[in-house]
Image (cartoon, grey):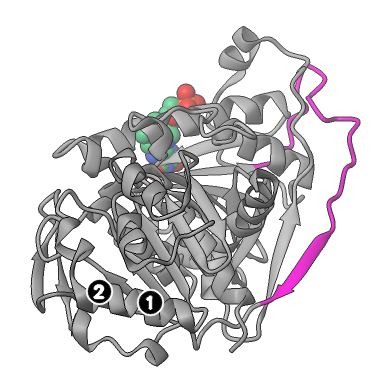
Amino acid sequence: MKKVLLFVLLLTSSLLAQPAAAAGEAITIIRLPEPILNGSISLEQAIKNLRSIQQFTAEPLKINQISQLCWAGTAEPNSSLRSAPSAAAVINPMQLYVMLPDGLYLYEPNNNDLVKYINGDLRPGLSGAAFRQWTVQSAPCIFIVAGFVNKIEAKFRGRGEKLLCLEAGRIAQNIDLQAVTLGLGSVPIGAFDSKTIARICKFAENLEPVYLICTGNTSQKPSFVPVLSRETVQSPAVSRPVDISKKRAVIIIVSSYFNDAEFFDVQDVLKIGGVQMDIACSITGEIKGVQMNTVTATILVKDIKVNDYDAFIFIGSPTVNEYLTNQDALNLVRAANDKGKILAAIETAPGIFANAGIVKGKNIASYPTQRTILIQAGAKWTDTPIEIDGNLITANDFPAARRLGAVILDSLRHQEN
Ligand SMILES: Cc1cc2nc3c(=O)[nH]c(=O)nc-3n(C[C@H](O)[C@H](O)[C@H](O)COP(=O)(O)O)c2cc1C
């Protein structure tokens, strides 16, 4: 099961960036070469040589140079930890985008690949958003460090903005120093209008651009042998068809104190993926989360029509009891399960599946408080972040929410229309 899970996660991790693609449009995924970990100059030399460079030659960066810079910025392959750490630890609110002359890519650290997100040269627009800085228009490779404010706010209320900037600073410094070792020039850019950049890059709600790093070749030869100088690795680009624009999901929350961090993570991923969504609850109107964020529920759980949706997603809450014995919720789960629809639940919400009687013999992850009722209902309870068993997708706690969204997205892509 774990192997299957790993495969699905590797597959789905790239899907987070598929979003902007229209129905049927192919997605370019560039698998990156492994980073090199034995450079030829010392950290002290790299720090001494680090200067902001504003002029680049037109020569594009090699794919292994881009890979190395991405690794320095965020990746710690096969780990939830990163090259540049996060105050929120494994929640990792930061994302690294790479703008090349042919489009905008998202770097996916778990898979070590770049997924093309938008086609075309966006650098003139980006330069406009950066108050017409020529460096931004002319750099052959621009890293955009962006972060989810809501993710970090969920853990550090009121300090999210500050922590995002601190984290972005660490990522940028890693990229700048790595650029020196590669014999490249770089300059960090902080003067820009965030809203315009978010619009140009079609960022999801709550994803805020914090820092740009322009990189490129310079006409000056470095005084040392740059890392990768003998490497000529080129990775092939692969394409995957995408058409999930007709898929619909309903996210179901309790009427008070739903876990808003989980909600926004799942919603962000599905929104990026182009999935249409409704929010359902036992009451309609403004609903408050544990972190005091509000969302608007437009549909009553009792009115949800199973045939209207492809996926049913239950968000966790300390007050999940509201649905554990609610016949509308339990009947909905049974009806959706009978039709083989995707049923997802996170944290305390898998307990609803137990009481609906659909977990017998199934691998189910949940928050430990639900362990007993799940085992009593015949589930094989596990403490892994995500379990996928047929149409049932469950997650144990809020740090797994984004991955839960990715797995749902992938399942929707493989579900027949
Ligand atoms: C937070 C931050 C934001 C910056 N923003 C810009 C910018 O928008 N445009 C620019 O040309 N340089 C920018 N820089 C680069 C500085 O101008 C540069 O680091 C400074 O002049 C010192 O030069 P040095 O990096 O060669 O030591 C920024 C640097 C930092 C640290």
Q: Is residue 286 left or right of residue 407?
A: left
Residue 334 bears which disc, if any? 1
Q: Is residue 217 magenta?
A: yes
Q: Residue 170 is drawn in which quadrant?
A: top left
Label 1: how many residues lie within 10 Å, few (<14), some (14-19) or many (20+)?
A: some
- Decide if residue 136 is in sight here: yes
Instruction: Determine if the C-beta at disc 1 is less than 8 A from ligand 1.
Output: no
Q: Amino acid at mark 2?
A: Ala
Work out whether residue 337 or residue 87 is closer to the camera in this orientation and state it: 337
Q: Residue 11 is drawn in which quadrant?
A: bottom right
For marks 1 and 2 on the same chain, the one whose residue lies earlier in the sequence: 2
Residue at image mark 2: 329
Q: Is residue 17 left or right of residue 32?
A: left
Residue in the picture at 42% in, 39% down = 92
Secondary structure of the magenta portion, mostly?
loop
Give ligand 1's quarter of the image.
Answer: top left
Q: What separation in Å lies between label 1 and label 2 (alpha carbons)?
A: 9 Å
Q: Amino acid at mark 1?
A: Arg
* Residue 205, x across and y down, in percent: 32, 63
- Magenta stretch bounds: 216-241
User: Which corner quadrant holds the C terminus?
Assistant: bottom right
Residue in the picture at 73% in, 13% down = 41
Residue in the picture at 44% in, 63% down = 269
Label 2: how many residues lie within 10 Å, few (<14), some (14-19) or many (20+)?
A: many
- Decide if residue 131 is in sight here: no
Work out whether residue 46 or residue 269 is closer to the camera in this orientation and state it: 269
Work out whether residue 233 or residue 53 is closer to the camera in this orientation and state it: 233
* Residue 361, x across and y down, in percent: 54, 56
Q: Is residue 199 above or below residue 171?
A: below
